[in-house]
Amino acid sequence: MRIAIDAMGGDHAPAEIVKGCLQAASHTEAELILVGDYQRIMDEINRSGSSYDPVKIRIVHAGETIENSDSPVRAARSKPDSSMVRAVELVKSGEADAALSAGNTGALMAAGLLRLGRIKGVERPAIVSIYPLIGQEKAFSLLVDAGANAECKAGNLLGFAHMGSIYMKSAFGVDSPTVGLINIGTEETKGTTQLKEAYQFLKKSGLNFIGNVEGRDVPVGAADVLVCDGFTGNVVLKLTEGMAWTILKTIKKRFTQDIVAKLGAAILSGKIKELKKEFDYSTYGAAPILGIRGLVFKMHGSSSATAVENSIVKAAVVASGDLPGQIRRAMALYAGAEEELESDDE
Amino acid sequence: MRIAIDAMGGDHAPAEIVKGCLQAASHTEAELILVGDYQRIMDEINRSGSSYDPVKIRIVHAGETIENSDSPVRAARSKPDSSMVRAVELVKSGEADAALSAGNTGALMAAGLLRLGRIKGVERPAIVSIYPLIGQEKAFSLLVDAGANAECKAGNLLGFAHMGSIYMKSAFGVDSPTVGLINIGTEETKGTTQLKEAYQFLKKSGLNFIGNVEGRDVPVGAADVLVCDGFTGNVVLKLTEGMAWTILKTIKKRFTQDIVAKLGAAILSGKIKELKKEFDYSTYGAAPILGIRGLVFKMHGSSSATAVENSIVKAAVVASGDLPGQIRRAMALYAGAEEELESDDE
């Protein structure tokens, strides 16, 4: 098992990426391939003071970096020597079983699509994201699409529901996961033209569709898989993060306003720490781009070393299965194209 | 000053609506007109035990009720004797200066449009909503559109920005309010086709446009006026509510888990109460439908008596100005149609 990591992508790259790799190396069987500026990666390794096993961690030099401000498709095409594109190339050539990046989401999607191609039957690949739940029985929901496709047709949303359900089962062992459509009302007549049509598709999909899910029911884990276009997904994820961050900050401010409050806060410090941990988006690691012919994972842009470490471990677990194959078979089955499936199967 | 209130709309109607009216009656100059089932309203008044001054509170009977499950436009047309349509009619006939309802948002919008009509120059009326901020210097942002127009063109978004800015100034005294466009990135090339176009319109609008606002910057009050389509607005509002509610519930659960935690929580009870108050969406009252020829306010569906009371007080303040006239003049000015304005002005 080999995992390629874009060392240069993300808000805290390369420092946190390299540190996360060193941390992961000690407790994963996988061989790690750090892709990026050789000198800067070596500097980070030396700075960390960690032991570095060149058999466990290999460095592949890449002379360019894709920035967040780069135009996604253009960057994926015009920067073939970028750390991100090189990492994806390693999956294509079979030198890596999965690639990870915390960089430009659109560019990662474009690189995955251009270099690895789309799975037969998938109209639009999507980015899945873990949506952590606070104080609920289940720990998270899956959100698809988390930002790759700002504008979607009803058929795209149906595809996201299928792929999300497969990922929920294969990566987390949830049988027949519930699927909800993010919408502005629970009635099937609510929302945009696309959402009304998607509702009808989902009803007949054979998936465990529970109907529309309103914004207020997202944080209570109304469905295992939450389906939406990438615009809505991006807003939902970032708003949730912003809310959690804002509320925690306000609690901290209020609870340290005076000496009496400080005493109460000291008594509650254990509970407050537990609460903070529930807010922590990094514990679940990266999530894959669903629908392309290979495993490419997107890590959170502001991933810390621990988030990178968790992402690598998660990617290794997923890579030990056959997610692209499962998606391909499900899509073929859904299209009723069983004959194609047979001739296509390796 | 006379304010008409739909007594039958909302999750807690008519009980909380009637109670809120009785509370408001004691400290507003306005004459209140409760519209709905006469007997049920009288029952609620008697049940409340409050003193009831028939000069201050008048009851107008309406035999029908528009339900949340009703199709908005159909209901507004086919239920002329509903409490909601009757309340709006009172504004049209000049018997009331403003109408308030906590009922079906779409139907209220339709009733307003059908009975009062659109202001010249306004393509699409919008619902404005108060977005309360937690732990920030400013207390709230204004969100337009909060749910009336699920699908929008770029020109509609520009209209929302103009109307929102006018309301922010006239109702809250904020000069040159900052305007932000809710989007999935800060760069002007981000988002859907409509949003990219809207960005360009806003840049040249003469408004105090500060650019795109991402989901994570919404809770910190990145702009005074947040512009988005009604789908996004609905999701943002409901998700924020859901998050606040979920986090408060989790805090309560954790802080009462054991005797030591309970002690800490007891010490912090004042601070926790202050925090809860910041979460309270009802303190700011109702918000108007912008762009129609009259004042129609939407109250939150689950409005408590206090929320209704605050809404009535707010509506009376706004009704003492000339919001529809201000919007009409601004739209005419923007369209460069000063000559039309003059011939049109009463």
Image (cartoon, coloured by chain):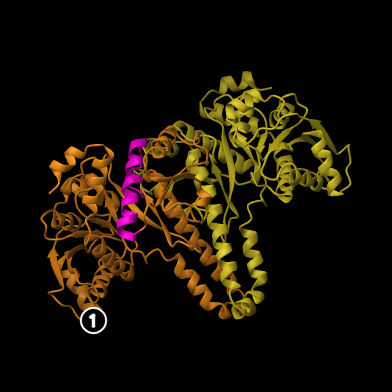
Chain colours: A orange, B yellow
Mark 1: amino acid: Gly
Quadrant showing the C terminus of chain B: top right
Query: Label 1: which residue?
Result: A49
State whether the magenta stretch is mostly helix, strand or loop. helix
Quadrant showing the N terminus of chain B: top right
Q: Kindly indicate the quadrant of the structure image that contains residue A86.
A: bottom left
Looking at the image, is B205 positioned above or below residue B254?
Answer: above
Looking at the image, is A105 positioned above or below residue B118?
Answer: below
Crowdedness near tag 1: few (<14), some (14–19) or many (≥20) residues, C-alpha within 10 Å: few
Q: Please state the extent of the stretch shown in magenta in the rendering.
A: A146-173
Residue A150 within the magenta-colored segment of the rendering: yes
Residue at the outermost top position: B343
Residue B180 image offset from top left, x and y in percent: 47, 45
Residue closer to the observer: B94 or A314? A314
Residue B2, visible in the rendered structure? no
Residue drawn where x is 63% and y is 33% of the image: B108
The total number of labels drawn is 1
Instruction: For mark 1, name the chain.
Output: A
Residue closer to the observer: B179 or B315? B315
Residue A111 left/right relative to B163: left
Residue B318 image offset from top left, x and y in percent: 69, 39
Residue closer to the observer: B100 or B295? B100
Residue B86 left/right relative to A116: right
Residue A198 within the magenta-colored segment of the rendering: no
Residue A209, visible in the rendered structure? yes
Residue A210 image offset from top left, x and y in percent: 46, 45
Looking at the image, is A52 positioned above or below residue B292?
Answer: below
Q: Kindly indicate the quadrant of the structure image that contains residue B33.
A: top right
Residue drawn where x is 51% and y is 66% of the image: A248
